[in-house]
Image: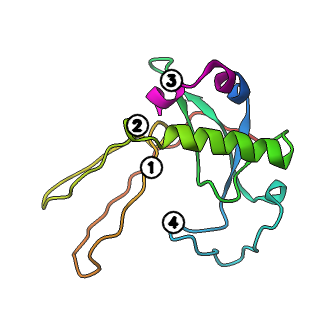
Amino acid sequence: MFAAYESLPADLKKAVAGKIAVHDGSRNSAGQLRKGYREVTDVRETVGAHHPLVRTEPKTGRKALFLGRRPNAYVRGLDVAESDALLDALWAHATTPEFAMCHIWQVGDVLMWNNLSVLHRRDPFDPNARRIMHRSQIKGDERIN
């Protein structure tokens, strides 16, 4: 997402500066509504983490787009149409093939990435295949209220 931010047109860089997005926390990675949450009909009522649309890597100072799941995401301070248009433009830009990497899994592979600078997803896989996943998480350095 460093390259995606760096190649944003000037008008989009200006539009994302200082903006905070609400990332929908009501659904799991399969898109299912989590227990205890209700369906959101107005994105301004989205419940979830609040993060800047642009994160700065503390050691290098490089900026990266920081996007969460698109459904029910909302940019604080914008009306719904403006928020949707901005997020749609960012997603369209960030998900182009030039910013994508596809891994073809082989036995013994290990992948690591920094969630602050990478969009990731998993494609469908053979449900009979054995998968072992371990996750490690480190507390971030920015907090938004």
Sooner in the amino-acid sequence: mark 4 or mark 2: 4
Sooner in the amino-acid sequence: mark 1 or mark 4: 4
Question: Around disc 3, counting alpha carbons within 10 Å, would you say few (fewer than 14), some (14 to 19), or many (20 or more)?
Answer: few
Q: Quadrant of residue 52?
A: top right
Q: Which residue is mark 4?
A: 29
Q: What is the three-letter code of the residue carrying label 4?
A: Ser
Give the distance between the C-alpha atoms of the residues marked 1 and 2, in whole angstroms.
24 Å
Q: Is residue 53 visible?
A: yes
Q: Is residue 18 above or below residue 29?
A: above
Query: Badges 1 and 4: C-beta atoms under 8 Å apart?
Result: no
Q: In x, y percent, where is residue 40?
A: 78, 67
Q: Is residue 7 above or below residue 100?
A: above
Q: In x, y percent, where is residue 116?
A: 49, 38
Q: Residue at x 25, y 51 (%)?
A: 103
Instruction: Give, as a single range, the part of the protein colored magenta.
Output: 1-13
Question: Mark 4, mark 2: which one is toward the viewer?
Answer: 2
Question: Around disc 2, counting alpha carbons within 10 Å, would you say few (fewer than 14), some (14 to 19), or many (20 or more)?
Answer: some
Q: Which residue is mark 2?
A: 99
Query: Viewer-proximal residue, 113 or 103?
Result: 103
Q: What is the three-letter code of the residue carrying label 2?
A: Phe
> SS at mark 2?
helix
Tell me, yes or no, whether the highlighted magenta stretch contains residue 3: yes
Tell me, yes or no, whether the highlighted magenta stretch contains residue 110: no
Give the distance between the C-alpha atoms of the residues marked 1 and 3, in whole angstroms.
29 Å
